[in-house]
Image (spheres, rainbow, N blue to C red):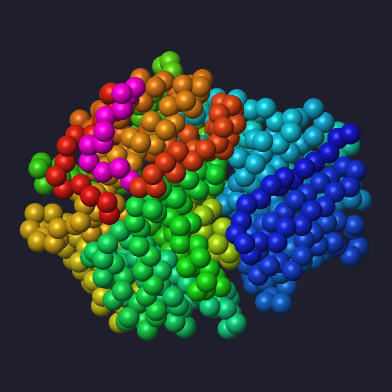
Amino acid sequence: MAGLDAFPSVYGGDGERTESFADETVAVNAGFHPALADEQPVETVTNDALVWVLGEVYGFERNGAYQPRPAGIDTPTYCANLYESDGIDFVHGLNGDFAGVIYDREERTVFLITDRLGSYPVFHARTDDTLLCSTDIQALARCPGVEPEFDRDYLAEFLAFKRSFGVTTPLSGIERLPPASVTAIDLDGLSTESRRYWCPRYRPKDEPFEYFVEEFVERFRRVLSEWVRDDRKYGLLLSGGSDSRLLMAAMDRPVVGFHMNDWPNREARVAKEVATAAGSEFHPLHRDEEYRRRSLAENPSLSNFDGWYKQGYPTAFADEITGSVDTLMSGLYADTLFKGHSIPSPKLSLGSLGKVTLPFETPIRTIDEFIERRAAEAPEYLVGEVDLESVLRENISATADGEIDHHGVRYPSIRELVLCSDYYPLSNDTELIYTNSLRQLGPYRTPFLDNRLIDLHLSMPVKYQLRRNIVHRAIERLDPSLAEVPHSESGVPTNRSFPVEYLGRHLNALRWKHLDSETPPTPWCTHGPWPNDEEFVRSNGFVRDALVENRELIDSHPHLDWDGVRRSYRDHLDGEDNTVELYTLLTLLEMPVTKRLCDVTETDGQESDGQESDGPPAQSSDDPLIKLPSTENGGDD
């Protein structure tokens, strides 16, 4: 019998609720936090439909008028009401981060819906008589009847670029739904039809910068005022920079500022100063040697082939965070949307002093130029030769109607491909494993993904993204005391002009590099929020030990070569930067799907001694080429 099994498995924390539904045709298993929904599915009153939603819908826009979701109505009930009144086209007006299933029993149709940016990936695969869907590719790959294999080209893209692109995945027979889509499934024949209801269109307005500052501040305030409730305690992932600081400035109440770091460095001190100035609690979260071991053991199961295991940063602090707050927020994606971080810009070499990124756009006018800028070498541990430039050319092309197809996701023109492909779809983002780890903890939000801010981003000229700082101006408007605190990276208060901030950032970077008397405790510790991973791989034996522990798995993998792994690691020790390909490899090796497809029993190789290996370990008799040079200053952080 034909059927659909949607979301066959979900992962989550201790507070998660799970609900299961099944009839003769459709089965749905859903996990959700009780703060986001009372129960699922929600049944419509008049047209015999069932509605499930993962994530949150914040409001609805109709004919240019926006209404926030009422506080007393949860997301699935809200969507069920809209489906009754507007039919499936209600999805076009939704604002939020979500994926959903609507089972219309009268029409014998199931609709799968994704939000504008595809922030919740929905993977799908077919067996003989069933269509299976899940937001977790690890779970989908182990469903009965699903027998994927690794696709070498798409696997090479993940290992080299730290992501998979478009609707593709490294597993044959498994793809993801496009962003901003409604996919209708006819249950009488399991035929499917997917249509796009939105795509990013860059239409810059010819307005002064002050216009955008006013719009940004007003929209940002409005988003937070609609979100914040008096009966909830809020936490914020706080850095020494400006994006999270903006949230603290816009909140009308104190929050708990969580700051993750390896040691009490400059970044941590500035973050504490920001929290103090805002009258908020500062809660440091220390990353120690146990943190890395646990990250490798726990986080790869959260990966949908996006990012590194280490980017599931909060999982090691789950109890501390969930025991302190009800809802967690972050400033993620401010850099991408409003600071031009995804806009290609030229770099000026200063010789031994390093490189400076110039605040101008490098024009990319053709698909060839886009591919040439993206292209990279495939890791040398892949079996056979993979020309990644050729793989990109096979998967990025112009369509007959003038759009650009990038691995199955379409963009209106080369302009949107260049400006928007880092976040559309969001399910391709290299930081998505970070977002997934935050969602494990409970309700989580980042205001920068609100539709109203996305729309503003698409109307803001590139020159303002590159040569102004709208986030800094907003902090100055919302809380002048926070704008007086220097930015941890630049050393300049955020209320200074862009030229002063730009010059100060580069001059202070040189001063700190050559004259700073404060020595980090290990070679890989920095004065920023994250360690120097290139140096960590080179100076600490953790990565080497993990590779050795996975030797059997590497030998059994059809596309991996152990000698190539050793060469990649040795080349890194000798000065090349192979951090990306080594970290993505470790993530791949610890994924449950990899162990299953290679028929290797899942074990935690990091449990052998519970410690990071430091300095030159005893040389392995069966692995003489994986070793570390002797160091005098390497130590556990």
Q: On screen, 358 above or below 325? A: above
Range covered by the magenta-colored residues: 612-623
| Image quadrant assignment for residue 80 | bottom right
Relative depth, front residue between 633 and 7: 633
On screen, residue 540 versus residue 55, left or right, reads left
Compared with residue 381, is residue 255 higher up or lower down, i.e. above or below?
A: below
Q: Is residue 162 visible?
A: no
* x and y, in percent, of residue 462 in the image: 36, 54
- Image quadrant occupied by the N terminus: top right
Between residue 217 and residue 426, name the one nearer to us. 426
Q: Is residue 277 left or right of residue 124?
A: left
Q: Residue at x 27, y 58 (%)?
A: 528
In the image shown, does 424 or 187 lie closer to the viewer? 187
Residue 81 visible at all? yes
**Quick check: 428 above or below 244?**
above
Task: Work out which quarter of the rendered image holds the C terminus and state it.
Answer: bottom left
Q: 570 or 391: nearer the eye? A: 570
Prevalent SS, magenta region: loop
Q: Residue at x 36, y 81 (%)?
A: 278
Quarter location, residue 208: bottom left
Q: Is residue 615 magenta?
A: yes
Query: For the point 81% across and 46% down, which residue is it?
Result: 27
Residue 537 lies, in percent from the top left, at 29, 40
Q: Is residue 277 above or below residue 629?
A: below
Name the residue at 56% across, 26% down. 598
Q: Position of residue 118 (x, y in %)?
A: 59, 49
